[in-house]
Amino acid sequence: MAGGAFVDGAAAGRAALYEYKITPYFIFACVVAASGGSLFGYDLGVSGGVTSMDDFLKEFFPKVYRRKHAHLLETDYCKYDNQLLTLFTSSLYYAALVSTFGASYLTRTKGRRASILVGGASFFIGGVINAAAQNVAMLIIGRVFLGFGIGFGNQAVPLYLSEMAPAKIRGAVNQLFQLTTCLGILVANFINYGTSKIHPHGWRISVGLATLPATLMFVGGLFLPETPNSLVEQGRLDEGRRVLEKVRGTTNVDAEFADLVDASDAARAIKHPFRNLLQRKNRPQLIIGAIALPAFQQLTGMNSILFYAPVFFQSLGFNNNVSLYSSTITNGALVIAALISMALVDKFGRRAFYIEAGVEMLIEMVTVGIILGLYFGDGKTLPHGIGYFLVILICLFVLAYGRSWGPLGWLVPSELFPLETRSAGQSIVVCVNMIFTALIAQCFLMALCHLKFGIFLLFAGLILIMTSFVFFFLPETKQVPIEEVIFLWRNHWFWKHYVSEEEVKAHTGGKLHP
């Protein structure tokens, strides 16, 4: 079977003895931790809106402002192509990819909660600096602090949610991160719409309000429990069991706790987790979880639309207000998609969402590319009917991405790594994600200017390749306990050649089956 035959059988054996109840303590911990996604989302939403505000452009990027108004009534692929302007956006992601390695050490030695606190504090500082910026250098310094916050937050939060969640609802719980990211984007669009009418410093309000989600994340983080997995990994077994009993709402946690202890024993034998990731037995997690899926999440072209939605719609010939309305609509679709994914991903599985949405997104990208090729560019005015049809297509694309490649790009990697390489693996996930996010941010407008409608056909080709990869190489992780994911590799048509029976026994305390 292309995707790997071992799926629901992983719920057997010791994992079948896991018990849990949904408790207020568990809900509080997950909601507070998931608020880390709002940092990422708020920045995604704000940065695109601010870079289209005239007051911001006049103060920091006057050449872009003049070029924009020279072509105000025209459709033009190139009016926002300015590398310094895109550096304002992408500098955050370069900082995030560097900081994630420090986050890995902190997450492994001090726990997931520590990284969440550091992320909140750093994001707060970045928001203050950006709101007070007097020159481009201050803007970029502020973006670097924001990037540190996102690097620490994105490294720790998906791990925290996956480790706190019972296996049967892990998909829905982990996607709280994606939901808060989407809500952050949506709120940022409403804020941008309001602040665009406040002259000349409305943009300062937009970037300064980043301090609010940062404050919520930091203050809430002070009251968060550490995950049982992390406590056991640190040798705090009694505390780990107490927290496990509290978040599961039962004292019958012997089976799950025994799996955590087995995984911790294997983890303590690993002194260099990054080096260990390169070993042959970890090749599936490295290729799929740490490299392919995080890169694929960005190569769909979705973040290009999120970064520059207001810019993109202005380039389509809409005025500022309609531009912000349009981007708000698309981001509202992203929130709806996240809710759909939360409700259904643990029922239908990860592979089904990836493959179905991949086919849909391929069709939509090709259609957008063809329409733009026929009606867009060379100073032509885009017919309003065609413009609104493009908005509908983009909304459908967002709905498909938002229930699949977006949330699953964080969920699935957080499920694949064993405890001994989990922090290191998640750091590479964030690093790869941020590398491709930064490259897309830095290159999209330039590519749009030079490739024109071809950029969307390029993304369509990439979606075809990525969907095929998922079909052949990604096993189903639905309802599989994290510590038993290793059995998937032994039962997969391709990855079984990399994971031996001896390595499975060493990881699971002698077991060959779940």
Image (spheres, rainbow, N blue to C red):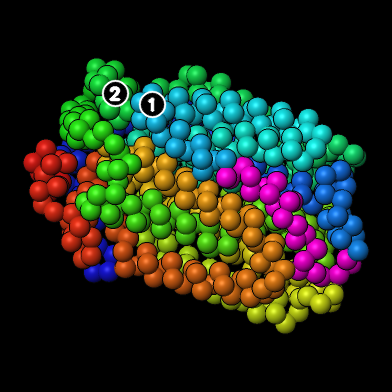
Mark 1 secondary-structure assignment: loop
Marking on residue 156:
none
* Badge 2: residue crowd in 10 Å (few <14, some 14–19, many ≥20): some
Magenta-drawn segment: 71-94
Q: Percent x, y for residue 236? A: 27, 19
Sequence-first disc among 1 and 2: 1
Residue drawn at (66%, 38%) of the image: 143
Which image quarter: residue 112? top left
Q: Percent x, y for residue 452? A: 69, 73
Mark 2 secondary-structure assignment: loop
Residue nearest the viewer, comparing 209 with 51: 51
The residue under label 1 is which amino acid type?
A: Gly
Residue nearest the viewer, comparing 347 with 472: 472
* Badge 1: residue crowd in 10 Å (few <14, some 14–19, many ≥20): many
Marking on residue 234:
2
The residue under label 2 is which amino acid type?
A: Gln
Residue nearest the viewer, comparing 91 with 239: 91
- The image shows residue 512, relative to residue 378, as above or below, that is above
Residue 44: say if magenta: no
The answer to whether residue 299 is seen in the rendering is: yes
Residue drawn at (37%, 52%) of the image: 289
- 499 relative to 201 in the view: left or right: left
Q: Which residue is mark 1?
A: 111
Quadrant of the image containing the N terminus:
bottom left
Contact flag, marks 1 and 2 (Cβ < 8 Å): yes
Q: Percent x, y for residue 120? A: 57, 28
Q: Percent x, y for residue 337? A: 54, 54
